[in-house]
Image (cartoon, rainbow, N blue to C red):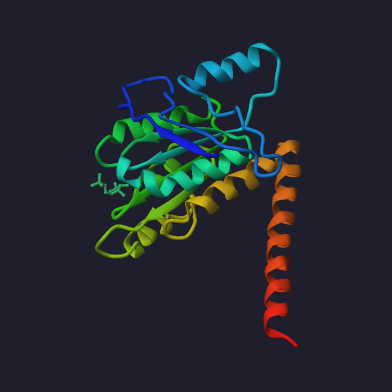
């Protein structure tokens, strides 16, 4: 069974990284619960890991421009959880809290974040602003709003100037954003690399099962 709790908190100036989303879900392969999402203060958890001489766990920040983006971004949280990746979820706006956005991006790497996923709709500048202030890879998720169907968000996010890349996924493509983050981190994490191999095999198996069913249904 999967449960999701969203505990919103206002980002405070120079705050440590409060986790505002916590999920319990199961590993996509074993069904075992994953303990990796930190509840409370992610920075403290990462410090504890390094104190005990363990490798720092891979960690993704999911930043959204408004709490109204959360229902879409749940998919990214969920898929990262199934891969056992620590997830920190924040609401930071490029327009409403621009200083917080820059501060977050400037300190993300030092705070143990490996990849940033940024979601915004409309004048969707958040991913670009974060990418301008961090060397980390930034994945943008254009959110579809009521009026223009997400094309506005997509164009605002994807048309970055040369030299400051944002990897933009499809409109509302939160799950793929999570999976792309896993691919990036798997380059330097053997456990994630093998989990990803398994995941891709399962995906292929699902298609072959569909093929077998369709073949049986339509072919003599
Ligand atoms: C963007 O404006 C947010 O990312 C959201 O998608 C959109 C609308 O925000 P709200 O008016 O719902 O707060 O910055």
**Residue at the image position 67 percent from the left and 69 percent from the top:** 210
Q: Residue at x 57, y 38 (%)?
A: 81
Question: Would residue 163 be found to the left or right of residue 121 on screen?
Answer: right
- Which residue of the protein is positioned furthest toward the bottom in this rendering? 220
Q: Report the quarter where the N terminus lies.
A: top right
Query: Measured from the top left, where is residue 204 in percent x and y?
Result: 72, 61
Q: In this orientation, which residue lies closer to the viewer: 45 or 115?
A: 45
* Image: 136 above or below 71: above
Q: Is residue 128 visible?
A: no
| Position above or below: 86 against 166 | above
Q: Residue at x 69, y 23 (%)?
A: 55
Q: Position of residue 110 (x, y in %)?
A: 53, 25
Total residue callouts: 0
Left or right position of 141 against 86 = left
Res 27 visible: yes
On screen, 62 above or below 9?
Answer: below
On-image quarter of the C terminus:
bottom right
Residue 85's spot in the image, x, y percent? 60, 35
In which quarter of the view is residue 213 placed? bottom right
| Quadrant in which residue 130 is drawn | top left
Foreground pick, 4 / 133: 4
Residue drawn at point x = 66 percent, y = 34 percent: 32
Nearer the observer, 87 or 167:
87
């Amino acid at each position: 069974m999967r449960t999701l709790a969203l505990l919103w908190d206002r980002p405070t100036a120079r705050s440590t990284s409060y986790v505002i989303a916590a999920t319990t879900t199961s590993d996509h392969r074993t069904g075992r619960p994953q303990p990796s999402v930190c509840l409370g203060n992610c920075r403290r958890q990462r410090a504890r890991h390094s104190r005990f001489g363990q490798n720092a766990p891979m960690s993704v920040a999911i930043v959204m421009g408004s709490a109204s983006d959360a229902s879409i971004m749940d998919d990214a949280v969920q898929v990262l959880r199934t891969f056992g990746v620590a997830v920190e979820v924040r609401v930071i706006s490029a327009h409403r809290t621009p200083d917080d956005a820059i501060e977050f991006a400037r300190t993300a790497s030092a705070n143990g974040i490996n990849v940033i996923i940024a979601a915004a709709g409309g004048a969707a500048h958040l991913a670009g602003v974060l990418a301008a202030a961090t060397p980390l890879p930034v994945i943008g998720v254009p959110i579809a709003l009521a009026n223009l169907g997400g094309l506005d968000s997509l164009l605002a996010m994807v048309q970055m100037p040369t030299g400051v890349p944002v990897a933009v996924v499809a409109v509302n493509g939160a799950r793929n954003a999570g999976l792309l983050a896993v691919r990036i981190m798997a380059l330097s994490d053997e456990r994630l690399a093998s989990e990803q191999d398994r995941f891709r095999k399962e995906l292929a198996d699902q298609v072959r099962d569909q093929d077998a069913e369709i073949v049986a249904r339509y072919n003599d």
